[in-house]
Image (cartoon, rainbow, N blue to C red):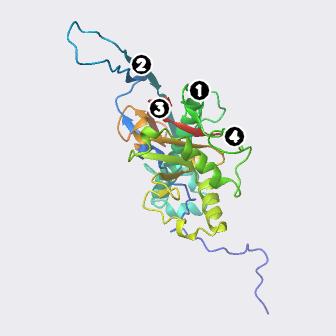
Amino acid sequence: MAFQVGSLSNYTKTNEQMLLVKSFFEPKTASLMSKLTGVKSSIQLPNLDDTLVWQTGGTCGLVNASGDTTIAARVLTIGKVKSEKSWCVADLEAKYTQLLLSPGSQYESLPGGIDEAFMNTVMGNQGQRIEQAIWQGDTTAWQDFLNKFDGLIKIIGAASGVVQANATPFIATPATAITVSNIIAVLQATYNAIPVQILNKPDLRIFMGTDLSRLYQTALINANLFNFVPAADSLGEYYLHGTNVKIVPVDGLNSTNKLYAARTSNLFLGVDGEGEDEELKVWYSEDYDTVYMRMKFKMGVQIGIPTEVVRFTL
């Protein structure tokens, strides 16, 4: 005699207490930028320049005015963003997820065990997309999360006066690719191109992708420069070896092969409400027996003084 179990499916233990959430990179750039709030559509960033003329002194007479004071402005234009979702909780009844549901047929919220994982996933995606949009945004892009406003790459690329570091005054041979063999030269060229008047500013930073940061650290090790391999602080910043300038690895520049040097006070983030991009509204509709979510925010970026920005692009 034996058990006859051929008609039964193999059993897989259900773990209704766990719902894994994928890893997201940590958004960083927005926290370093100068933030402008209350922006509904666009805002001017006025800048002042003055030509100061030294005249020969030691004489008296009428004022001999000389030298112009120029006021110009760059415009920060924000994009208006909305995300909406809906869930019929009853869809969970036919699967193992029924174990998460409360007794009865009235479901007026996301079930416990899903709601926390849902929040973590939504906010992880949100932070990741904002980081990418700040740098890679382009209103002509096909991706939904990149075409709401122009990012720093496009804005800096179009601005007159930005210093291009991938040129012979700063690097012996202009790079056509960035590799472990030339990343040190690429960073030194970026440093060499920084205008001297901002070299001692405490908010000066070199921004590059986390992928290039890893490449740079590998190059330092290969060059036997172990004493310069960085021990990153809480922001992941570290000094470019032999200089006083900090590098900030940002995931928004991953896979772009681009580096930028600028003062953080010269990079502007425009929003309507403070923290608006982190606010979720979730509600239950009796009319449709459905749980809804909505997120709405405004955001845009701009640089203030292009001549104080350096780019290394291929």
Between tags 2 and 3, which lies in front?
2
Between tags 4 and 3, which lies in front?
4
Q: Alpha carbon of mark 1 to alpha carbon of mark 4: how far? A: 15 Å
Q: Which residue is mark 2?
A: 72
Q: Earlier in the sequence, mark 3 or mark 1?
A: 1
Question: Would residue 314 appear left or right of 66 to someone viewing this image?
Answer: right
- The residue at 70%/50% (across/down) is 178
Disc 2 element: strand
Q: Which residue is mark 3?
A: 303
x%, y% of residue 219?
65, 62
Q: Which residue is mark 1?
A: 158
- Amino acid carrying label 3: it is Ile
Q: Alpha carbon of mark 3 to alpha carbon of mark 1: how far? A: 11 Å
Q: Earlier in the sequence, mark 2 or mark 4?
A: 2
Q: Earlier in the sequence, mark 2 or mark 3?
A: 2
Disc 3 element: strand
